Amino acid sequence: MISNKITARLAFIYIFLCLVPTIAACVFLISWEQQIIDRQIEERLEDATVFLVDVFEEGLISRSNISLSDIQSDVARLGENLRIRITLIDRSGKVLADSGKSTLGEVAAMDLHDTRPEILAAKEHGRGEASRFSDTVGAPFVYVARSVEQDNVLHGYVRASVRASTVREQVVAASSRLGLLALLVGSVNLFMIYYVVRSFMKRMSDLRHAADLVATGDLQQRVGLADHIDGGLGRSFNRMTSELAVNVDSVRERSEQLATVLGGMVEGVIAIDSRQRVLFANRSAATLLGFKAETATGNSLLETVRLQPLHTAATEAFETGEQTRLDADVGGGVNRSLTIRATPLPGKPCPGVVLVILDVTELRRLEGLRQEFIANVSHELKTPLSSIKAYTETLLNGALQDTNNNERFVRRIAEQADRLHDLILDMLSLARIESAEQSYEITPISIADVVEKSLSSHQDSAAHKNIQLVTKPPQTKLFVRAESEALRQILDNLVKNAIMYTGEGGIVTVQWDRDSRDTAMVAIKVVDTGIGIDKKNHARLFERFFRVDKARSREQGGTGLGLSIVKHLTQFLNGTVAVESVLGEGATFTVCLPKAEC
């Protein structure tokens, strides 16, 4: 009795599972087939209109040379051969020929077609399509129309159409084929269902025994049952799938996902229990705090990490039940600034705490640079503004009438204004370069041409100090991949600095050749015989507002941003910049840029 009941239920379920997908597949395939047929009809009509434009273009453009009877005859013949209805329409909407009509009299009796949807669309876009009821024929049609133009002048339209019943006939034929296929598939499925159910009933006792083994913990046992059965077999199967397979797999999957996420985090993560023993520690935490993640599990936090702020944060989180945040500095080889967040796990008493350690060393460094930059900008702007204000007040208080000094005061105001102007321009230029707002077109650039222009612009300032500007070009003309203005700005800043820090009668030399260390690069050197730069200042030389000799730089009108601009422009051009100098023996600035072949 039970066996027959189970057999009937299984048979019903399997038949249902096979019947529903088969019906769904048939519905889908019929819909898909209809779309294909519609698309084929549309493509057929589209190809026909293109062909008809070529055939009847001359007749529509110059109708005086061809009689309408000839056109009607050709249209009728082509319509019969192509098995479509063809209509020729002039630009006013009058029908000139129609393969659906036998005589020109019938064609002449047709209404104007200028308001037909497909004609309106073709008039506006050159092509139109529509599916609608034909008042002329008294049946639904699918239309595709195309305009005939010459030199942007509209001369008429060609239209191809088929009866909608033709499309339906093709769909019905396709549906019939699919129905027969579905019947065949259903018959095969019924035979397979009979075989599967019968085989299943023979293995029922074995499946029940396997399910009981899985339920008691033998996870190696597997059964292929897919439905719920009354009695001991069904309960064993449900117990296996719900209590073991789902739960165990779910827990394992979540555990693996959590371990992967925590292991890949940049932040250090340590989980501890209520006794402050380590439950989990990722590699980032081990790297930041200097311990081995593999051996930390099970050990106390105090034994694993000797960092007092970490233990303080964990203890406070346990005691207060709230998140605790502390900052810590770690030394020993590499100085690091850390932020520690201790979050207690929910529950009373607290079952554990998760410690998240974030390395904020770079953030603190950037914050310091930002504050230093703001301070430098404020100071650099304040100095010329204070001077301008002081000289202006002096002039307003009576010095304006002092013919011996008023011109000197005005000249000083102009100098400070120029200095302020140069500073603001350099700051804007640096900001554009760093934010990538300024775009450069990288092309092969002749170094000699840019050097000549740069030195020419500094001849007056060099002559004022009796400084010689010398060039040492290579034997062959070299080109670099750069942007002319960017390279000019690099050379201008380097030459200007060289002149500024070179004394009376000195020499500033610009030389360039292939880089001896990398033949794919060109090394451009600006060499001076000036005061030189102490080695301890080399590392900071390209920072904003850093000056080796602040008094000389301000006296000469330097902004303190020139070398920083050089550094950023060189990096933007995929190059490098370096300095070699000994105090009192001059300096050599070397810019290496990619060589260009010309």
Image (cartoon, helix red, strand yellow):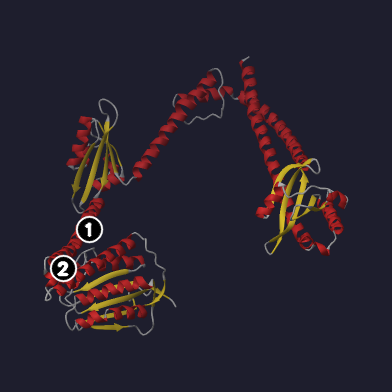
Which mark identifies residue 362? Answer: none
x%, y% of residue 562?
26, 68
Q: Is residue 452 visible?
A: yes
Q: Depth check: 573 or 5 in front?
A: 573
Q: Is residue 450 left or right of residue 50?
A: left
Q: Amino acid at mark 1?
A: Phe
How far apart, in angstroms, are the residues tagged by discs 2 and 1? 16 Å
* Residue 550, label in figure: 2
| Quadrant placement of the C terminus | bottom left
Q: Given the image, on which type of amino acid does mark 2 rest?
A: Lys
Quadrant of the rendered image containing residue 65: bottom right
**Point 80% across, 40% down: residue:** 138
Secondary structure under badge 1? helix
Task: Give how far across and how far down residue 28 sits, in percent.
Answer: 66, 37
Q: Percent from the top left, x then y, of residue 36?
A: 69, 45
Residue on which the image places disc 1 = 373
Farthest bottom residue? 475
Pointer 2 and pointer 1: residues touching (CB < 8 Å)?
A: no
